[in-house]
Image: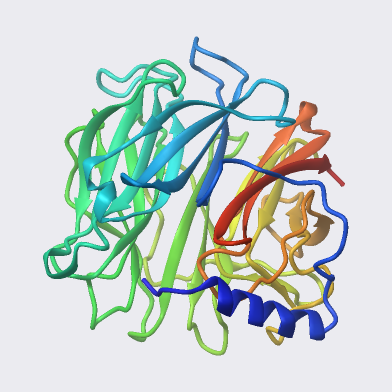
Amino acid sequence: MRRWTPVIAFLTSLVVLAAGLTPASAVVDKQQLVPGYGSYARLIRLQYSPFGKGHILASLTSEDGGGKFTPIMESTDEGASFHKIGEIRDPDGKLGECCGTLYELPQRVGRLRAGTVLWAASYRQDAGAQRRIGIKVWASSDGGKRWTYLSEAAVSHNHDGIWEPEFTVDAGGTLWLHYADETQAPKYAQVLNRVASTDGIHWGTKQLTLAIPPDRVRPGMPIIRRLPDGRYWFSYEICNYGDRYCDPYYKISADGANWGDPADPGTRVNTAGGNYFQHAQTVTLFPGGPNGVRLVMVGQIYTNAKGTPVAGNGQTLLANDNLGAGNWYPLPAPILITGIYNNFCPNYSSTLLPVDGGKSVLEVATEYNLGCKAYFGKGPMG
Protein backbone atom coordinates (compact mmCIF):
# COMPACT_ATOMS: atom_id res chain seq x y z
CA MET A 1 0.00 0.00 0.00
CA ARG A 2 1.37 3.41 -0.96
CA ARG A 3 0.77 6.62 0.95
CA TRP A 4 -0.32 9.77 -0.88
CA THR A 5 -1.16 13.30 0.15
CA PRO A 6 -3.77 15.84 -0.92
CA VAL A 7 -0.92 18.20 -1.84
CA ILE A 8 0.29 15.77 -4.47
CA ALA A 9 -3.29 15.39 -5.69
CA PHE A 10 -3.64 19.14 -6.07
CA LEU A 11 -0.41 19.50 -8.01
CA THR A 12 -1.32 16.61 -10.25
CA SER A 13 -4.76 18.09 -10.89
CA LEU A 14 -3.04 21.20 -12.26
CA VAL A 15 -1.16 19.03 -14.73
CA VAL A 16 -4.39 17.29 -15.74
CA LEU A 17 -6.16 20.60 -16.29
CA ALA A 18 -3.25 21.88 -18.34
CA ALA A 19 -3.70 18.85 -20.58
CA GLY A 20 -7.08 20.24 -21.62
CA LEU A 21 -9.43 18.04 -19.61
CA THR A 22 -12.66 19.10 -17.93
CA PRO A 23 -11.95 22.08 -15.65
CA ALA A 24 -12.43 21.82 -11.90
CA SER A 25 -14.74 24.85 -12.03
CA ALA A 26 -17.40 22.94 -13.99
CA VAL A 27 -20.83 22.87 -12.33
CA VAL A 28 -21.49 19.48 -10.73
CA ASP A 29 -24.40 18.07 -8.79
CA LYS A 30 -22.91 15.87 -6.11
CA GLN A 31 -23.33 15.53 -2.36
CA GLN A 32 -20.94 14.27 0.28
CA LEU A 33 -22.00 10.84 1.50
CA VAL A 34 -20.53 11.01 5.03
CA PRO A 35 -18.62 13.69 6.92
CA GLY A 36 -14.85 13.40 6.77
CA TYR A 37 -12.82 10.62 5.24
CA GLY A 38 -14.39 8.20 2.76
CA SER A 39 -13.00 5.54 0.40
CA TYR A 40 -13.98 2.33 -1.44
CA ALA A 41 -17.71 2.96 -1.50
CA ARG A 42 -20.13 0.19 -2.53
CA LEU A 43 -23.82 0.27 -3.49
CA ILE A 44 -26.43 -2.51 -3.43
CA ARG A 45 -30.21 -2.63 -3.63
CA LEU A 46 -31.87 -4.99 -1.16
CA GLN A 47 -33.79 -7.61 -3.15
CA TYR A 48 -34.27 -10.50 -0.74
CA SER A 49 -34.31 -9.00 2.76
CA PRO A 50 -37.73 -8.49 4.41
CA PHE A 51 -36.16 -5.44 6.10
CA GLY A 52 -36.20 -2.58 3.62
CA LYS A 53 -36.66 -4.55 0.43
CA GLY A 54 -36.02 -2.22 -2.49
CA HIS A 55 -34.00 0.21 -0.39
CA ILE A 56 -30.46 1.14 -1.42
CA LEU A 57 -27.50 0.55 0.90
CA ALA A 58 -24.13 2.27 0.62
CA SER A 59 -20.99 1.30 2.51
CA LEU A 60 -17.51 2.80 2.63
CA THR A 61 -14.47 3.03 4.83
CA SER A 62 -14.42 6.11 7.04
CA GLU A 63 -12.31 7.19 10.02
CA ASP A 64 -12.64 8.93 13.37
CA GLY A 65 -10.79 8.97 16.69
CA GLY A 66 -11.47 5.25 17.13
CA GLY A 67 -9.79 4.34 13.85
CA LYS A 68 -11.17 3.11 10.54
CA PHE A 69 -14.78 1.92 10.50
CA THR A 70 -17.66 1.32 8.08
CA PRO A 71 -20.80 3.46 8.17
CA ILE A 72 -23.83 1.87 6.50
CA MET A 73 -26.01 4.40 4.71
CA GLU A 74 -29.54 3.90 3.38
CA SER A 75 -31.54 5.62 0.66
CA THR A 76 -35.32 5.26 0.40
CA ASP A 77 -35.72 7.81 -2.43
CA GLU A 78 -33.75 6.19 -5.27
CA GLY A 79 -30.43 7.77 -4.33
CA ALA A 80 -31.59 11.36 -3.95
CA SER A 81 -30.48 11.30 -0.29
CA PHE A 82 -28.84 8.96 2.25
CA HIS A 83 -29.05 8.55 6.01
CA LYS A 84 -26.99 6.40 8.35
CA ILE A 85 -28.63 3.22 9.70
CA GLY A 86 -25.70 1.25 11.11
CA GLU A 87 -21.95 0.81 11.30
CA ILE A 88 -19.29 -1.88 11.51
CA ARG A 89 -16.45 -1.30 13.96
CA ASP A 90 -14.08 -4.21 13.80
CA PRO A 91 -11.49 -4.07 16.63
CA ASP A 92 -8.75 -4.29 14.01
CA GLY A 93 -9.94 -1.04 12.42
CA LYS A 94 -7.42 0.71 14.65
CA LEU A 95 -4.73 -1.10 12.63
CA GLY A 96 -6.21 -0.19 9.25
CA GLU A 97 -9.16 -1.09 7.03
CA CYS A 98 -9.17 -1.22 3.25
CA CYS A 99 -11.21 -1.98 0.18
CA GLY A 100 -14.44 -3.33 1.62
CA THR A 101 -17.34 -4.96 -0.20
CA LEU A 102 -21.09 -5.24 0.38
CA TYR A 103 -23.24 -8.19 -0.73
CA GLU A 104 -26.76 -9.52 -0.16
CA LEU A 105 -27.19 -13.29 -0.11
CA PRO A 106 -29.64 -14.34 -2.84
CA GLN A 107 -30.35 -17.64 -1.07
CA ARG A 108 -29.71 -19.43 2.21
CA VAL A 109 -26.08 -20.34 2.96
CA GLY A 110 -25.85 -22.52 6.07
CA ARG A 111 -27.77 -20.68 8.79
CA LEU A 112 -27.56 -17.39 6.90
CA ARG A 113 -30.93 -16.70 5.32
CA ALA A 114 -31.55 -15.15 1.92
CA GLY A 115 -31.42 -11.38 2.38
CA THR A 116 -28.53 -11.52 4.87
CA VAL A 117 -26.16 -8.66 4.07
CA LEU A 118 -22.44 -9.44 4.17
CA TRP A 119 -19.52 -7.06 4.57
CA ALA A 120 -15.84 -7.93 4.16
CA ALA A 121 -12.66 -5.84 4.19
CA SER A 122 -8.91 -6.14 4.63
CA TYR A 123 -7.64 -5.30 8.12
CA ARG A 124 -4.32 -4.76 9.93
CA GLN A 125 -2.31 -3.28 7.04
CA ASP A 126 -0.92 -0.66 9.46
CA ALA A 127 0.19 -3.18 12.10
CA GLY A 128 3.92 -2.65 11.49
CA ALA A 129 6.18 -5.59 12.32
CA GLN A 130 3.15 -7.65 13.36
CA ARG A 131 1.39 -7.07 10.03
CA ARG A 132 -0.65 -10.08 8.94
CA ILE A 133 -3.48 -8.77 6.82
CA GLY A 134 -6.77 -10.61 7.14
CA ILE A 135 -10.08 -10.39 5.29
CA LYS A 136 -12.81 -10.39 7.92
CA VAL A 137 -16.51 -11.04 7.33
CA TRP A 138 -19.48 -9.45 9.10
CA ALA A 139 -23.22 -10.12 8.62
CA SER A 140 -26.49 -8.26 9.13
CA SER A 141 -29.86 -10.02 9.28
CA ASP A 142 -31.95 -6.82 9.49
CA GLY A 143 -31.05 -4.92 6.33
CA GLY A 144 -27.81 -3.36 7.52
CA LYS A 145 -28.76 -1.94 10.92
CA ARG A 146 -27.04 -4.40 13.28
CA TRP A 147 -23.90 -6.39 12.47
CA THR A 148 -22.33 -9.59 13.81
CA TYR A 149 -18.79 -10.78 13.23
CA LEU A 150 -18.68 -14.11 11.35
CA SER A 151 -15.13 -15.10 10.45
CA GLU A 152 -11.74 -14.34 8.99
CA ALA A 153 -12.01 -15.82 5.50
CA ALA A 154 -8.34 -15.41 4.57
CA VAL A 155 -5.16 -14.22 6.23
CA SER A 156 -1.71 -13.40 4.87
CA HIS A 157 1.05 -15.80 5.87
CA ASN A 158 3.63 -13.01 5.54
CA HIS A 159 3.80 -9.20 5.46
CA ASP A 160 2.34 -8.98 1.96
CA GLY A 161 -1.21 -7.93 1.33
CA ILE A 162 -4.55 -9.54 0.51
CA TRP A 163 -7.04 -7.03 -0.84
CA GLU A 164 -10.34 -6.23 -2.51
CA PRO A 165 -12.72 -9.00 -1.36
CA GLU A 166 -15.72 -9.83 -3.55
CA PHE A 167 -18.56 -12.24 -2.71
CA THR A 168 -20.70 -14.42 -4.93
CA VAL A 169 -22.91 -17.49 -4.49
CA ASP A 170 -22.37 -20.04 -7.25
CA ALA A 171 -24.99 -22.10 -9.07
CA GLY A 172 -24.64 -24.88 -6.49
CA GLY A 173 -25.26 -22.59 -3.50
CA THR A 174 -21.65 -22.29 -2.29
CA LEU A 175 -20.48 -18.90 -1.05
CA TRP A 176 -17.19 -17.70 -2.58
CA LEU A 177 -14.90 -14.88 -1.59
CA HIS A 178 -12.51 -13.68 -4.30
CA TYR A 179 -9.55 -11.43 -3.51
CA ALA A 180 -6.23 -10.06 -4.77
CA ASP A 181 -3.23 -11.80 -3.18
CA GLU A 182 0.33 -10.45 -3.04
CA THR A 183 1.66 -13.24 -0.82
CA GLN A 184 2.91 -15.43 -3.67
CA ALA A 185 5.79 -13.10 -4.54
CA PRO A 186 8.41 -13.37 -5.93
CA LYS A 187 6.87 -15.91 -8.32
CA TYR A 188 3.91 -13.59 -8.91
CA ALA A 189 3.62 -9.95 -7.87
CA GLN A 190 -0.10 -10.51 -7.38
CA VAL A 191 -2.70 -13.15 -8.23
CA LEU A 192 -6.45 -13.53 -7.83
CA ASN A 193 -7.45 -16.25 -5.39
CA ARG A 194 -10.77 -17.51 -4.04
CA VAL A 195 -12.01 -19.42 -1.02
CA ALA A 196 -15.32 -21.25 -0.55
CA SER A 197 -17.72 -21.63 2.37
CA THR A 198 -21.02 -23.38 3.03
CA ASP A 199 -21.84 -21.32 6.13
CA GLY A 200 -19.89 -18.02 6.00
CA ILE A 201 -17.85 -19.12 9.02
CA HIS A 202 -15.60 -21.93 7.85
CA TRP A 203 -13.57 -21.39 4.67
CA GLY A 204 -11.70 -23.84 2.47
CA THR A 205 -8.18 -23.77 1.08
CA LYS A 206 -7.51 -20.94 -1.32
CA GLN A 207 -7.78 -21.72 -5.03
CA LEU A 208 -6.02 -19.90 -7.84
CA THR A 209 -8.30 -17.92 -10.16
CA LEU A 210 -5.84 -15.80 -12.16
CA ALA A 211 -2.03 -15.90 -12.22
CA ILE A 212 -0.21 -14.54 -15.26
CA PRO A 213 3.54 -14.65 -15.84
CA PRO A 214 6.00 -12.94 -15.80
CA ASP A 215 6.42 -12.08 -12.16
CA ARG A 216 5.63 -8.35 -12.49
CA VAL A 217 2.05 -8.84 -13.78
CA ARG A 218 -0.69 -7.92 -11.29
CA PRO A 219 -4.32 -9.01 -11.79
CA GLY A 220 -6.62 -7.46 -9.19
CA MET A 221 -9.89 -5.68 -8.39
CA PRO A 222 -12.30 -8.64 -8.79
CA ILE A 223 -15.97 -7.84 -9.48
CA ILE A 224 -18.59 -10.56 -10.12
CA ARG A 225 -22.15 -10.15 -11.40
CA ARG A 226 -24.68 -12.88 -12.18
CA LEU A 227 -26.16 -12.49 -15.66
CA PRO A 228 -29.87 -12.97 -16.47
CA ASP A 229 -29.06 -16.29 -18.18
CA GLY A 230 -27.54 -17.62 -14.93
CA ARG A 231 -23.90 -17.32 -15.93
CA TYR A 232 -21.37 -15.26 -13.98
CA TRP A 233 -19.52 -12.22 -15.35
CA PHE A 234 -16.13 -11.64 -13.74
CA SER A 235 -14.22 -8.39 -14.35
CA TYR A 236 -10.78 -7.38 -13.08
CA GLU A 237 -7.80 -5.28 -14.00
CA ILE A 238 -4.42 -6.59 -15.12
CA CYS A 239 -1.46 -4.29 -14.47
CA ASN A 240 1.99 -4.50 -16.11
CA TYR A 241 0.83 -6.96 -18.76
CA GLY A 242 2.94 -6.64 -21.90
CA ASP A 243 2.83 -2.98 -22.96
CA ARG A 244 -0.49 -2.46 -21.14
CA TYR A 245 -1.04 -0.70 -17.82
CA CYS A 246 -3.90 -1.68 -15.49
CA ASP A 247 -6.49 -2.41 -18.20
CA PRO A 248 -9.92 -3.97 -17.53
CA TYR A 249 -10.57 -7.57 -18.61
CA TYR A 250 -13.33 -10.11 -18.07
CA LYS A 251 -14.23 -13.80 -18.12
CA ILE A 252 -17.60 -15.59 -18.00
CA SER A 253 -18.26 -18.75 -15.98
CA ALA A 254 -21.18 -21.13 -16.48
CA ASP A 255 -21.48 -21.94 -12.77
CA GLY A 256 -19.62 -19.26 -10.79
CA ALA A 257 -17.29 -21.89 -9.33
CA ASN A 258 -14.95 -22.66 -12.22
CA TRP A 259 -13.02 -19.98 -14.09
CA GLY A 260 -10.83 -21.87 -16.53
CA ASP A 261 -7.06 -21.67 -16.95
CA PRO A 262 -5.59 -19.19 -14.42
CA ALA A 263 -2.99 -18.16 -17.02
CA ASP A 264 -5.68 -17.11 -19.52
CA PRO A 265 -6.03 -13.30 -19.17
CA GLY A 266 -9.57 -13.24 -20.57
CA THR A 267 -10.99 -10.54 -22.85
CA ARG A 268 -9.87 -6.93 -22.75
CA VAL A 269 -12.38 -4.05 -22.52
CA ASN A 270 -12.04 -1.03 -24.84
CA THR A 271 -13.97 1.19 -27.23
CA ALA A 272 -13.82 1.02 -31.03
CA GLY A 273 -11.17 3.74 -30.94
CA GLY A 274 -9.11 1.91 -28.31
CA ASN A 275 -10.09 4.06 -25.32
CA TYR A 276 -10.19 2.30 -21.95
CA PHE A 277 -10.08 2.80 -18.20
CA GLN A 278 -6.84 2.60 -16.27
CA HIS A 279 -7.21 1.30 -12.70
CA ALA A 280 -9.94 0.17 -10.38
CA GLN A 281 -12.81 -0.76 -12.68
CA THR A 282 -16.17 -1.84 -11.30
CA VAL A 283 -19.13 -3.15 -13.33
CA THR A 284 -22.88 -3.02 -12.69
CA LEU A 285 -25.81 -4.59 -14.54
CA PHE A 286 -28.45 -2.26 -15.99
CA PRO A 287 -31.61 -3.13 -17.94
CA GLY A 288 -31.49 -2.78 -21.72
CA GLY A 289 -30.01 -4.24 -24.88
CA PRO A 290 -30.92 -7.34 -26.91
CA ASN A 291 -29.88 -9.66 -24.08
CA GLY A 292 -31.95 -7.81 -21.49
CA VAL A 293 -28.89 -6.47 -19.71
CA ARG A 294 -26.44 -3.65 -20.24
CA LEU A 295 -23.02 -3.87 -18.64
CA VAL A 296 -21.87 -0.48 -17.36
CA MET A 297 -18.29 0.07 -16.19
CA VAL A 298 -16.63 2.89 -14.31
CA GLY A 299 -12.87 3.22 -13.88
CA GLN A 300 -10.39 5.68 -12.48
CA ILE A 301 -8.68 7.27 -15.53
CA TYR A 302 -10.30 7.37 -18.98
CA THR A 303 -7.52 7.24 -21.58
CA ASN A 304 -6.86 6.71 -25.26
CA ALA A 305 -5.12 3.62 -26.66
CA LYS A 306 -1.73 5.09 -25.71
CA GLY A 307 -2.77 5.56 -22.09
CA THR A 308 -3.11 9.35 -22.26
CA PRO A 309 -6.13 10.88 -20.43
CA VAL A 310 -8.76 12.20 -22.84
CA ALA A 311 -11.67 14.64 -22.71
CA GLY A 312 -14.36 13.23 -20.46
CA ASN A 313 -11.87 11.83 -17.97
CA GLY A 314 -13.65 11.85 -14.61
CA GLN A 315 -17.16 11.95 -16.07
CA THR A 316 -17.35 8.93 -18.40
CA LEU A 317 -18.78 5.43 -18.14
CA LEU A 318 -18.33 2.60 -20.63
CA ALA A 319 -21.23 0.34 -21.63
CA ASN A 320 -21.79 -2.85 -23.59
CA ASP A 321 -25.06 -4.50 -24.68
CA ASN A 322 -23.58 -7.84 -25.78
CA LEU A 323 -22.41 -9.36 -22.48
CA GLY A 324 -19.03 -7.70 -22.93
CA ALA A 325 -18.28 -8.98 -26.45
CA GLY A 326 -17.09 -6.48 -29.04
CA ASN A 327 -16.47 -2.80 -28.51
CA TRP A 328 -17.77 -0.79 -25.59
CA TYR A 329 -19.18 2.72 -25.94
CA PRO A 330 -18.99 5.80 -23.69
CA LEU A 331 -21.84 7.27 -21.65
CA PRO A 332 -21.82 10.33 -19.37
CA ALA A 333 -21.29 9.69 -15.67
CA PRO A 334 -23.70 11.50 -13.34
CA ILE A 335 -21.00 13.31 -11.36
CA LEU A 336 -17.68 14.91 -12.27
CA ILE A 337 -14.51 13.94 -10.38
CA THR A 338 -11.41 16.13 -10.83
CA GLY A 339 -7.72 15.85 -9.98
CA ILE A 340 -7.54 12.21 -11.07
CA TYR A 341 -4.22 10.36 -11.14
CA ASN A 342 -2.73 7.01 -10.10
CA ASN A 343 -3.69 7.20 -6.44
CA PHE A 344 -6.03 5.42 -4.03
CA CYS A 345 -8.53 8.30 -3.79
CA PRO A 346 -9.73 10.29 -6.83
CA ASN A 347 -12.31 8.28 -8.78
CA TYR A 348 -10.75 5.07 -7.42
CA SER A 349 -13.01 2.01 -7.32
CA SER A 350 -16.19 4.04 -7.79
CA THR A 351 -19.55 2.28 -7.62
CA LEU A 352 -22.75 2.42 -9.73
CA LEU A 353 -26.38 1.32 -9.35
CA PRO A 354 -29.44 1.57 -11.61
CA VAL A 355 -32.21 3.71 -10.08
CA ASP A 356 -35.61 5.02 -11.16
CA GLY A 357 -36.40 1.74 -12.89
CA GLY A 358 -33.12 1.81 -14.80
CA LYS A 359 -33.75 5.26 -16.28
CA SER A 360 -31.04 6.81 -14.08
CA VAL A 361 -27.61 5.86 -12.77
CA LEU A 362 -26.50 6.48 -9.19
CA GLU A 363 -22.76 6.85 -8.59
CA VAL A 364 -20.58 7.15 -5.50
CA ALA A 365 -17.01 8.28 -6.19
CA THR A 366 -14.18 9.79 -4.18
CA GLU A 367 -12.23 13.02 -4.65
CA TYR A 368 -9.63 15.03 -2.75
CA ASN A 369 -11.13 17.99 -0.88
CA LEU A 370 -9.18 18.58 2.34
CA GLY A 371 -8.77 14.83 2.50
CA CYS A 372 -10.34 11.96 0.59
CA LYS A 373 -14.12 12.41 0.52
CA ALA A 374 -16.94 10.30 -0.95
CA TYR A 375 -19.62 11.97 -3.08
CA PHE A 376 -22.86 10.70 -4.61
CA GLY A 377 -25.15 11.86 -7.36
CA LYS A 378 -27.46 10.49 -10.02
CA GLY A 379 -28.28 11.36 -13.58
CA PRO A 380 -30.01 9.96 -16.67
CA MET A 381 -28.81 6.63 -18.04
CA GLY A 382 -27.79 7.46 -21.60
Q: Position of residue 42 (x, y in %)?
A: 53, 43
Q: Position of residue 84 (x, y in %)?
A: 53, 27
Q: Position of residue 141 (x, y in %)?
A: 37, 17
Count the marks: 0
Residue nearer the viewer, 6 or 312:
6
Quadrant assignment, res 260: bottom left
Q: Residue at x 57, y 79 (%)?
A: 8
Colour scheme employed for the rendering of this structure = rainbow
Q: Position of residue 126 (x, y in %)?
A: 26, 63
Seen in the image, is 60 located left or right of residue 155? right
Residue nearer the viewer, 148 or 46:
148
Q: Is residue 136 above or below residue 217?
A: above
Q: Is residue 200 above or below residue 376?
A: above
Question: Does residue 305 appear in this view?
Answer: no
Q: Residue at x 24, y 31 (%)?
A: 149
Residue nearer the viewer, 229 or 6:
6
Question: Does residue 23 appear in this view?
Answer: yes
Quadrant assignment, res 19: bottom right
Q: Quadrant of the N terminus?
A: bottom left
Q: Is residue 18 above or below residue 193?
A: below
Q: Residue at x 43, y 70 (%)?
A: 219
Seen in the image, is 183 located left or right of residue 227? left
